[in-house]
C-alpha cells in the first residue's frame, strides 16, 4: 500500500499528515517528508498528524524517532498528534507515545 504525506506550512508549525500504512516499504517516504520539512522550512515546530494512518509498525516508529531526534538536534520542537485506535495502542505499548507527543527529551 502506498503512503502519501501532505505538508502544510503554517506560521505556528510545519504539519505533515501521512495517509495510509507506515511499514518497511513506506517508512522511507515518511522519513523523506520529515527530512524535507526539517531542511527546507522556517524554524517552526514540526507536527506529524497521524489521524490518517491506519497501520504503523516498528519501521514507522523508527522513522518518527529519527525525525524527532534530527528535529530536536536542530533546535526545533517535534510533536506527534492524531493517533487513534491501533496506531495509538502501538505507540503506547512500545513506550514511545509520551516522547513523540511532546514529552521530555
Image (cartoon, rainbow, N blue to C red):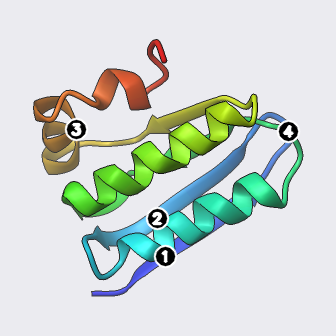
Q: Which circle's residue, 4 or 2, is located before the other in the chain?
A: 2
Q: Which residue is mark 3?
A: 91
Q: Which mark is residue 43?
A: 4
Q: Residues within 10 Å of mark 4 (few under 14, many from 20)?
A: some
Q: Is residue 48 shown above or below 32?
A: above
Q: Which residue is mark 1?
A: 29
Q: Position of residue 37 (x, y in %)?
A: 72, 57
Q: CA distance from mark 2 to mark 1?
A: 9 Å
Q: Which circle's residue, 1 or 3, is located before the other in the chain?
A: 1
Q: CA distance from mark 1 to mark 4?
A: 22 Å
Quarter of the picture holding the N terminus: bottom left
For the point 59% across and 56% down, the residue is: 16
Residue nearest the viewer, comparing 98 with 5: 98
Check the image and name the residue furthest to the top: 104
Q: Residues within 10 Å of mark 3 (few under 14, many from 20)?
A: many
Query: Circle 2 — which element?
Result: strand
Q: Which mark is residue 18?
A: 2
For the point 44% across and 37% down, the residue is: 81
Is mark 1 in CB contact (under 8 Å) with mark 3?
Answer: no
Is mark 2 in CB contact (under 8 Å) with mark 3?
Answer: no
Query: Circle 3 — which element?
Result: helix
Amino acid at each position: 500500500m502506498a503512503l502519501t504525506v501532505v505538508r502544510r506550512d503554517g506560521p505556528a508549525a510545519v504539519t505533515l499528515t501521512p495517509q495510509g500504512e507506515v511499514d518497511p516499504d513506506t517508512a522511507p517516504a515518511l522519513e523523506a517528508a520529515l527530512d524535507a520539512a526539517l531542511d527546507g522550512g522556517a524554524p517552526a515546530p514540526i507536527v506529524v498528524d497521524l489521524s490518517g494512518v491506519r497501520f504503523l509498525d516498528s519501521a514507522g516508529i523508527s522513522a518518527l524517532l529519527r525525525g524527532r531526534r534530527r528535529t530536536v538536534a536542530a533546535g526545533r520542537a517535534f510533536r506527534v498528534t492524531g493517533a487513534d485506535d491501533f496506531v495509538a495502542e502501538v505507540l503506547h505499548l512500545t513506550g514511545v507515545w509520551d516522547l513523540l507527543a511532546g514529552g521530555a527529551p
